[in-house]
Image: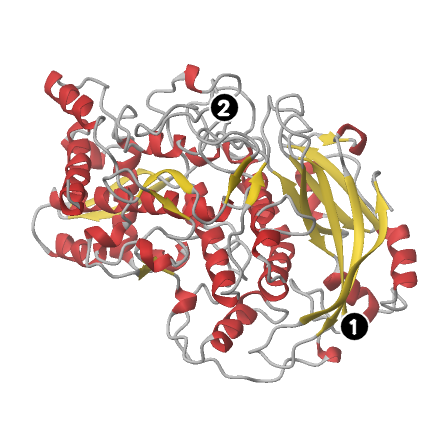
Amino acid sequence: MSPITTVTTVAKHILFTSLLISPSSLASPVGFTDGSVSDEALRTLEERQQSVIVTLGAANFGDNNAHPRLEVRELERNTDQWNLFLLGLRRFQNTDQRDKLSYYQISGIHGRPYVTWDGVGQGQGASGGGYCPHGSNLFTTWHRPYLALFEQILYLNARQVISELDDGDVKDGYETALTTLRLPYWDWAAVPPDGEGSFPLSAQRRTVTVALPNGTATFDNPLLTYRFHPLVREDFASAPWTTYTQTVRNPSSSSGNAASRNDLVAMDLDDNRRNMQSRVYDMLSLEHDFTSISNYLQPGDSFESLHDTIHNTVGGGGHMSEIAMAAFDPIFWLHHANVDRLFAIWEALNPNSYVRGMENTFATWTYPGGSFADANTALTPFRKDDQGNFWSSSDVRWITTLGYTYPEFNDLTDGAATLVSRVNSLYGPRATSQLGNFKARAVSVPLHTREDNKGVAGAAAFSYNRKYDLNIKARKFGFDGSITVYVFLGDAPSSGSDTWAKEPSFLGMAGILSQKGSSDKQQPNVDAHCVVPLTAALESKAHSKELSSFKEKDVEEYLKKNLKWRVISANGDQVSTKDVPGFQVSVAWQDIQPSNSTTEFPKLKGDYKTLKNSTGENL
C-alpha cells in the first residue's frame, strides 16, 4: 500500500466516524447517540480496526506546509479557526470509543486502559502500563509523534465538519481556516495578557458558541472536560477513576458527581507562574546538555520536571495528576504542545546535543525495564509508513518533519540572536506578554541596571553574579500517588493547602507526577528531581538589605531562619516529609556571568556547589 493509499484509508476512517453521530448533534448540548449502531456500521468498524494507522501529521492532509501551532489565546482571536478547532475537537471526542482513532483510544495510548493499540503488542518482558516512556531519554521525543497523531485526527475531524455544512460564507471561512489549523499550545510560564490569568478562560468555560450556516450552536466546551461514553469501569481498575463519568480538575469529591474546581486551579497557576517562568528561563538560557534536561533522573531541573508540576497543579487529585489517566483531560494536549515547543526552542539553541544512549529504568507497554534506548529506538506505537517502520528520535528531531512549527521560529532574521532575544522577552527578568506573536526583527539593547531591578521578578537578573536553587528529590513511586512541594521564604502555613500559594511568603512549588497503587515494590527505587529557583527572591531581599550579602555564609544563615517547605498529596492533604521515601532537599549555588544585551544569555561559571542538605521541613 502506497503512502497515498494510506492517507486515503485514514481519511475514510475519519469520514466513517461521522456515521456514529446524529446529524442534529451539532446543536445538541452533548451530541452522543444512544449507542445504537447499525450492523453495517459495526462490520465496517471491525474491518477498519485491522488496518494500520500511519502518523503523518496534519500537513500531509493539507497544503504540505509546516504551519505554526499558536498559543491558545492567539488561536482564539481568529474566530473562524477557533470555531473550527472546537467543532473538530468535539467531533473527535464524540467518536465511538471502540474506534482506534477515537479520542478515547488515542488518549489511552499514554496509560490506561493498558491495552494494545493498533496491533503494537506488549513487548517480551515489558510490564509497564501504557506506551509513554517516563523518566527516559525518549520522554520529550516520544511525545512528538503522539501529538502529531492527535493533531492529524483533529484536522481530519475538522475537515469532516466542513464537508457536512451547507455552502456559503461560513463554510468558505472554515475551509480557509482549515489549511493552517494546528493543535494550539498553552504557555503556562509566560506573562499572560492584561486582565487575564495564566489558565486560559477557554479551558474553563462551561459552554461555547460557534457559527453555523443557519445561525449559531451552543454546546458543552470540549476543552473543559472529556465525558466518557460510556465509562468502562474495568478499564480503570480502581476508585475514584471507576466513578468519574468525566475528567475532573481539583475535584470537589471522589464521587461520580464531583465538580471541577477550576477557580482553585487558576489561582495556583497564577501564584506559581513566576516560579515557572524562572525555571523555564534557567532551562533555556543556562542548560546545554540534552540528557540532563530531558528527564527527571538527573539532579537539577528538566522539561519532564516542569511538566510534572503543571500536571499536579491542574489535576489536584483529578485526572491530570495521575500518570495513567492524564491524557483524557483535554488540557493535556495543549500542555504537552507547550512542553514540545519549549524543547524545540532548546534544540534550536543547542543543535549539537541530542538523544544519547542510556538504560531506561522504567518499563513501558513495549519495552521492559532496563532497556537500552538511543536516538534510533522505535517510538512505539507510532508508525511512519505502512511497512511497519516506527518513528525514531532521529526522525523527529526537526519539527517541520511532522508538519508544524512554532511562532518563535518565524523570521529569524539574525538567527540564534533573534531567538535568544525572543526567549528573553518571554521569560527573562524583564519579560512582557508576547503570546508567541513574533514578527519584528530583534534589536540588541542594554538590559536594565542592577539598581533598576528591585522587584522579585519571575526570572532572576543575576545582578549579584550568582544563582541559588532549592533542589528537591524523592522516590518517583515511593509515595502512593503524586506529591507537590510548596516552598516558603518566611512563615509557612500549617493547614488549608488550598490557599498556601496565596501566602505572602510563598516562593513556588514543584511536583513529582506519579500514580496511586504504585510503590517501590512494583517500581525501581529511582529518584525524581525538581527545582524551585531561589535567586530572584534572594536578590529582592538583598536589595531591601534584609539579606546582608550573596556570600554563602550570609545566605546559609538567612535561609536557615526563613526557608521552609511543605508537602501535599495529589488530593491536597499535607504529608510529613518522613512519609515520603527518599525525600531530600539541598540548597546549591553557582557563579553567573550576567548577559549584557537582550540578544545574549547569562553564562554559568565554575562548579555547582551544595550549600546545605535537609530531609526535614526546613534547613
Residues 37 and 323: in front is 323
Q: Are marks 2 and 1 in contact (CB under 8 Å)?
A: no
Rendered image quadrant of residue 469? bottom right
- In the displayed structure, does residue 8 sit left or right of residue 110? left
Please give the label number shown on residue 521.
none
Q: Amino acid at mark 2?
A: Gly
Q: Residue at x 8, y 46 (%)?
A: 166
Q: Amino acid at mark 1?
A: Tyr
Rendered image quadrant of residue 102? top left
Q: Residues within 10 Å of mark 1 (few under 14, many from 20)?
A: some
- In the displayed structure, does residue 242 sit left or right of residue 158? right
Q: Residues within 10 Å of mark 2 (few under 14, many from 20)?
A: few
Q: Position of residue 299 (x, y in %)?
A: 70, 49
Foreground label between 2 and 1: 2
- What's the coloring here? secondary structure
One can see residue 393 in this view = yes
Q: For mark 2, what is the residue?
A: 125
Up-down: is 296 above or below 347? above
Q: Position of residue 186 (x, y in %)?
A: 46, 52
Q: Work out how far the residue at label 2 is from the one at label 1, CA to CA, in angstroms.
A: 52 Å
Residues 406 and 256: in front is 406
Q: For mark 1, what is the residue?
A: 464
Q: Residue at x 38, y 57 (%)?
A: 399
One can see residue 432 in this view = no
Q: Position of residue 386 (x, y in %)?
A: 23, 40
Q: Which type of secondary structure does the marked residue at label 1 adopt?
A: loop
Residues 106 and 187: in front is 106
